[in-house]
Amino acid sequence: SCLVGSEMCIRDSVIRLMGKKTPAKKAMGEAGLSLIPGSDGILKSAEEARTVANSVGYPVLLKAESGGGGRGMRIARDESEIKAAYDDAQNESRAAFGDDRLYLERLIEGGRHVEIQILADKYGHVIHLGERDCTVQRNHQKLIEESPCPSLSEDERQRSCDAATRATAAIGYVGAGTMEFLLTSDGVLRFMEMNTRLQVEHSVSEMRSGIDLVAEQIKIAAGQPPVSYTHLTAADER
């Protein structure tokens, strides 16, 4: 027998890798996904944060390495705000996660939050079930999910979904997972993080694809391959 969604079914080393933001970004960049400009790993000090911010351009976002739910994040809109933002993000991260390590990304304002649903079996087969637009949020908590994303070009949709499946296979992930991206003004989806679990909003992808994700995760845990799947397009759904 196998516990669905546990380390017995999904390689715990991959879960640990994707659970830390900077190693996850490095792995996904090496696998071919576009990234948000920022620090090359963990920041050592507020002074280093200032140097990186001056390089990538303001505004920037200080983010907790072990963060989630919007905690451990602070915006700095110019050089004068770096020290306070660094200290505040570090203190909140330490209190919330027991880990005060931070990294930095350029703040993408006006971008759209898009996530790609993934299924991967134990034999190296990976499929995607299209994307969900979850831009409408309150306090970094999602309120509305829409699929397909109305702002994503068909070319970028296919490129990013294909890249997400290749990246998932490259790290040896097994089970249901979600790749989260920001759609920037240049029309490119840039990787933020991967959720190594089945999310509450998975039912949106189920409605779009007609595939029962819970049933498929159980099949994967039992050693069966996921369903064969043809890429969805916005035109198909309309």
Image (tube, helix red, strand yellow):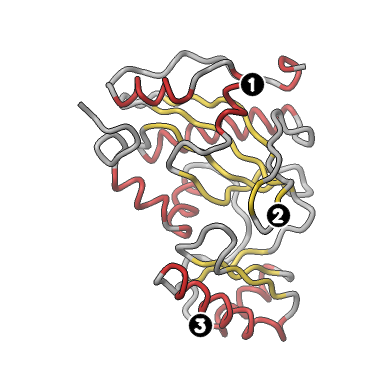
- How crowded pointer 2 is (Cα within 10 Å; few <14, some 14-19, many 20+) is rated as few
Q: Is residue 222 left or right of residue 61?
A: left
Q: Amino acid at mark 3?
A: Ser
Cα–Cα span, label 3 and label 1? 45 Å
- Dot 1: within a 10 Å radius of its alpha carbon, few (fewer than 14), some, or many (20 or more) residues? some
Tell me where residue 216 appears, x and y as whole percent. 42, 21
- Label 2 sits on what residue type? Arg
Circles 3 and 2 in contact, beta carbons < 8 Å: no
* In this rendering, the label closer to the viewer, 3 or 1: 1
In the rendered image, which residue does mark 3 sit on?
45
Identify the residue at image location x=41%, y=19%. 226
Helix, strand or loop under label 2: strand
- Measuring 31% from the left and 24% from the top, which residue is drawn there? 123
Point out the tag, 3 or 2, that comes first from the N-terminus: 3
Which is more foreground, mark 2 or mark 1? 2
Give residue 171's position: percent from left, percent from top.
Answer: 38, 41
Say which mark, if any, is on residue 138: 2
Q: Considering depth in this image, is 120 or 160 the residue closer to the camera?
A: 120
Q: Amino acid at mark 1?
A: Arg
Q: Earlier in the sequence, mark 3 or mark 1?
A: 3
Dots 3, 1 in contact, CB < 8 A: no
Instruction: In the rendered view, tell whether residue 90 sits above or below residue 171.
Output: below
Decide if residue 178 is on the left or right side of residue 11. right
In the rendering, which numbered label is found on residue 208? 1
Give how far across and how far down residue 31 sits, in percent. 47, 42
On the image, which quarter does residue 38 sit in?
A: bottom right
Which is more toward the observer, 9 or 77? 9
Of helix, strand and loop, which one carries label 3?
loop
Quadrant containing the C terminus in the rendered view: top right
Q: CA distance from mark 3 to mark 2?
A: 30 Å
Q: Where 205 falls versus 193 (above or below)? A: above
